[in-house]
Amino acid sequence: MTVELAGADHPMTGAPPFGSGKLVTLAHWQDPPGNRWAFQHVRELMPTAAIRRGTGPVWPLPRAERDVLDLVVASGDRTTTVGQHLDETQTDGFLVLHRGQIVAEHYFNDMEPDTRHLLMSVSKSVTGAVAGRLVGRGLLDVDARVTDVVPELSGSSFDGATVQQLLDMRTGTRFNENYDDPGADVRVYEQVYLWRPRVDADLPADALAYFATLENDGLHGGPFRYRSVLVDVLAWVLERVGGARFHELVSSEIWAPMGAEFDAEVTLDAHGNAMADGGISATLRDVGRFGLLYLAGDLAGRPKVVPPAWVVDTVRGAPDGPEAFVTGDATPGFPPGAHYRNGWWVAEPATPLLYGSGIYGQNVFAHGPTQTVVVKLSTWPTPLNRRSVETTARAVTVIGEHLENNVPGRKVASGPPVASRNDQAE
């Protein structure tokens, strides 16, 4: 596939779905069929900063391939196989890690092992991990007021909010995240971050100025409400306490110490502010390595990067986290105790099953009982597809239980199908 640059417009030639003369532009790069190309070529559409892997050793992932594509998955009223599910949901990359070994690794849509794929809101989980590292180093207090760390936000809607409330999506900030509404805050906000052509001339010049324009429609510490902008405010907090730009913090705190195989990258606004909520692109295996950091237990060879206490706090959640979840934006169907914490969806706290999730089909799952991590990167034709995430979540437990039950002397109990929150994934 070749690309001829023409400003922000890219004529595509090569294999379907692109034919000669087709364009992928900022106006529609998230829409089909353009997203099938764009999610693997983000830096050709907008400015990015490199998240360096550093010069240290790569975390080895031994291979122990197994055929998991024929495993049967029952989700809701439908039964399918893992392979059929991948075919039907515009999968670009699929990875299964069991006890630190690569069991399955599949690429589609011209994606390769060294291809960086847009993670959308899996980026939030990475940002949460950076926060955990800074907490572990004594640089960040999650109970601190946001304005104590970033005085520039004094007098704004973030007065009185805590860092933990940013992490858990529980500030009082008004922010419309309806992806199907071109006038919603989340879509207008993309103009500030150079994800869309700037058509609103009166928008602030950069994200930091945009934060000050937001207002509240609720109390800080109230119900869980999914609003991506809170993670970008959090990134400003992390930059301030960490003494470096966001992409540098992800590199020094997560990517380099975890032994990433390749550099990642993150998109920037016109003044160099990173879109921490959804702008990271990374390779399939490196997302798998990241997921392994959130498995409990002493996995042989696993780098000790995210503090264990932070993982425990993420799984346990706030004392009122489940109540805030069900009275807020959570879709019905989650088991009791489910919550959102530190940039992660915790679907089964007792198990646990936790995952990072992004629109258009980006997911990393960490399933504790079976020591399994599953990564699925996709380019759905629509931002949201609840059935697909539910099926993927169920496939994680089916795959994990199959693998664990075939380890001599080890059995795990089969759990119920897992409901998933997908209509707030980005």
Image: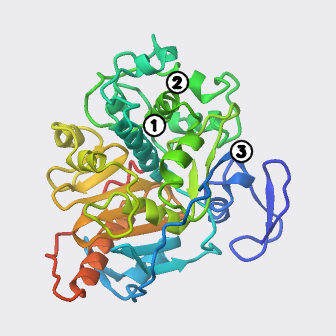
Pick out the residue farthest to the top.
155
Q: In the depicted view, which residue is nearer to us: 273 or 84? A: 273
Q: CA distance from mark 3 to mark 1?
A: 20 Å
Looking at the rendered structure, the kind of residue marked 3 is Pro
In the displayed structure image, the side of residue 126 where residue 70 appears, left or right: left
User: Relative to the observer, which residue lies in front, 309 or 423?
Assistant: 309
Image point (37%, 45%), residue name: 343
402 lies above or below 139 = below
Residue 3 placement, left or right of 395: right
Residue 164's place in the image compared with 43, above or below, is above
- The mark that comes first in sequence, 3 or 2, is 3
Q: In x, y percent, where is residue 330?
A: 27, 46
Task: Tally the numbered discs.
Answer: 3
Pointer 3 or 1: first along the chain: 3
Q: Which mark is residue 231?
A: 1
Question: Residue beneath label 2, please?
Answer: 211
Instruction: Specify whether 40 is left or right of 65.
Output: right
Is there CB contact under 8 Å for labels 3 and 1? Answer: no
* Residue appearing at x 51%, y 30% in the figure: 236
For residue 213, above or below residue 93: above
Q: Which mark is residue 73?
A: none
The image quadrant that residue 149 belongs to is top left
Q: Nearer the viewer, mark 3 or mark 2?
A: 3
Disc 3/disc 2 C-alpha distance (Å): 21 Å
Picture coordinates of residue 408, whole percent (x, y): 20, 89
Residue at image location 32% in from the left, 38% down from the top? 168
Amino acid type of disc 2? Answer: Phe
Contact? badges 3 and 2 (CB < 8 Å):
no
Q: Which residue is mark 3?
A: 47
Look at label 1 and name its amino acid: Val
Q: Is residue 155 left or right of residue 36?
A: left
How far is mark 2 from mark 1, CA to CA?
Answer: 11 Å
